[in-house]
Amino acid sequence: MDSIPIGELLTFLWNVIKEPVAYIDYEQNLRTLETKMHELLHLKDDLTENMQMAEVRGMRSQVTGWFSRVGRMKTEIDELMDQATQEMQKNCFGSCCPKNCWSRYKIGKKIDEKLKAVSDHIDKGENYLSSVPSPVGSVMRCLCESEKSTIGIYGPGGVGKTALLTQVSNNLLSSQLQFDFVIWVVASQDPDSERIQGDIGKEIGFLEDRWKGKSFQHKAREVSSVLSQKKFVLLLDDLWKPVDLAEVGVPSRENGSKLVFTTRSEELCNSMGAEEKIRVGGLARDKAWKLFREKVGEDTLNIHPEIPRLAETIAKMCNGLPLALITVGRAMAFRKTLSEWHHSIEALSRATAEFPSTPHQDFVLVKFGYDSLPSDKVRSCFLYCALFPEGFCIKKSDLIDYWIGEGFLGAYSDACEARIEGHTIIDILAQACLLEDEGGDVKMHQVIRDMALWVDSRRERPAYLVEAGTQLADAPEVGKWEVVRKVSLMANNIQNLSKAARCNDLVTLLLSRNNLKMISDTFFQSMPSLKVLDLSENREITELPLTVLRMAHCASSDRAVGDGVQTGGPGSLARDLQCLDHLNLLTITIRSLYSLQTFASFSKFQAATRELSLQQFQHARSLDMSLLGGMNGLDELEIIDCINLKDVGISNSSISISACL
């Protein structure tokens, strides 16, 4: 009889008994089952969310069955875990008596069976999840195949609706779909039909000069005349109220043209006649946690073993909203102690409880990033950015000049030092994800801008009156000006400012990018505190009102901005500026060599100019830069569209300018 090597015999015996032994010693499998069950429940939540956001009628019955089985499995596993925990608590001679071993064996075998069943359900659930079309895919399907012409995308603020619409726009522009126009228009909280009409006109090629002086109805006929002959997609972002697009000139869309809009309200989708409604919900739990973790940073998360658990709690409070996850995550990156994390959870809980189930709850989450800024100075600089129109690219140098004029950056003898601090504050705001850094510009997300204005509105005495980019033809009633410190009427169609307002506390007045032709001499007479006045890109203004010139004794007009200066001489802006004794910061655009020579002869121009733009010198062939030799404070010089300019002469006397240039 052949002998069996002892090693092979032991291996055979171990293979026979190792599975029963594993069943008896089931603690590790029990922990794995608990982890896998949590994973399955998270997958169920994600699939439920995605099913609500997409049209998946064909697979709904299959998924409903999967949901039911997961529910039953949870009940069974909860009972099994209770039974297993009770069994582990028994102590029969070290848990090795035959009766206890048999009981543990049976429980361990059930745990193993359930572990395999849970893993199988996870695989099926992930397959279902991958089969659900993304919101972008749903929109593109409607644009490519569907007979439905109006698509409404809705969801809470900061959830990513604008990002989704941007992706749709990019897909359309890069695809072979036969649309003659892809038109993007921002509606905003107070949708103005004239502004929307103007934006559509620009997108389809109507120049402002062509439309100047034409009535709203005439423009509507012109828009309709063009679009009726074309196949177009109108992308209307951030709609808060219904808009009559037919009144604007947008024709009906029987020819395959489409309207896609975003809004926070499903009800507004119905009001706008949306034939397809696509809900955008928060990120899935695992994606939300990944984004939050990335913004907090591993260094902070690893400071204490309890912090990751607290971080998951805060991430869950953000409701999957990307903007909230980003801003709150960046704020928490600087919390280094357990007490700070506990305090933050309490603060967020109190704040969200104050505004349950309202649009303001989105603001509360984002406001946490604002509250976490290091100082009141930085917070003031941040709020100032809300004075610009929605979606506006704010030039960094301009923004810092405004802050200097306001006095936010302190009293620096050297403008360079103030600018360095200004750039530092911009970096702080960008790192907090409250501003988007775009090289030489910054932008403010529309929800963050809304939050900033909301913060101001909740003050006992709101400081801001902002009607920027709303296509106003007339300035707001003067009564609205009397109690505020900052007024922004940028990017409107205001032509005349005649009514004087009693604004004793007004510090900033932004009037750039209007069509101003006339400002009455009395308009500024009751604004003794005015420090920042922006009149740029109003090319038909050739004289400053007498009241501005008299404001010199008030130490105001710290920042004036001019544009489009073409002629000098008596009564011109050049001579007017010389009268502003306290003017210390000037940004100006000049469009002729004669004007440059005229301005350069005035000491106030030489001393106060920080930014100089020379544009469209049509006849000048050479430029002697010694004209700028006395401009020691000049920080920025640009020469644009001077097509005949061949020679720029630079000498030693022309380069004694600021080191900031």
Image: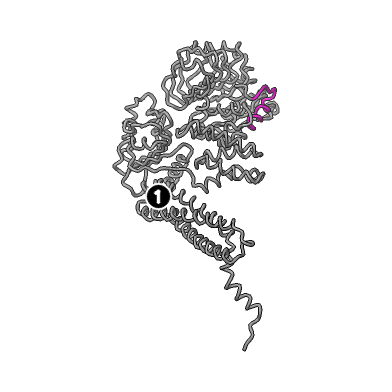
Q: Which residue is mark 1?
A: 176
Report helix, strand or loop for mark 1. loop
Give percent across and percent down for residue 226: 33, 36
Quick check: 362 left or right of 180?
Answer: right
Q: Is residue 608 above or below residue 205?
A: above
Residue at the extreme bottom = 1
- Determine the image quadrant of residue 342: top right
Is 424 colored magenta in this rendering?
yes
Q: Front-most of 192 and 454?
A: 454
Main SS, magenta region, reads helix
* Position in image of residue 553 (x %, y %): 61, 11
The chosen color scheme is: one colour
Q: Say which quarter of the image contains residue 569.
A: top right
Task: Using the rendered image of the protein, determine whether residue 186 is visible from the camera's viewpoint.
Answer: yes
In the rendered picture of this protein, how many numbered marks are placed on residues?
Answer: 1
Tag 1: amino acid: Gln
From the image, which quarter does the C terminus lie in? top right
Front in this rendered view, residue 305 or 586: 305
Query: Does 246 sit left or right of 24 as displayed?
Result: left
Q: Nearer the viewer, residue 474 or 384?
A: 384
* Residue 446 visible at all: no
Q: Which residues are magenta?
A: 409-425
- Are there few (<14), some (14-19), or many (20+) residues within 10 Å of tag 1? few
**Figure check: 478 above or below 109:** above
Magenta segment includes 218: no
Residue 227 falls in image quadrant: top left
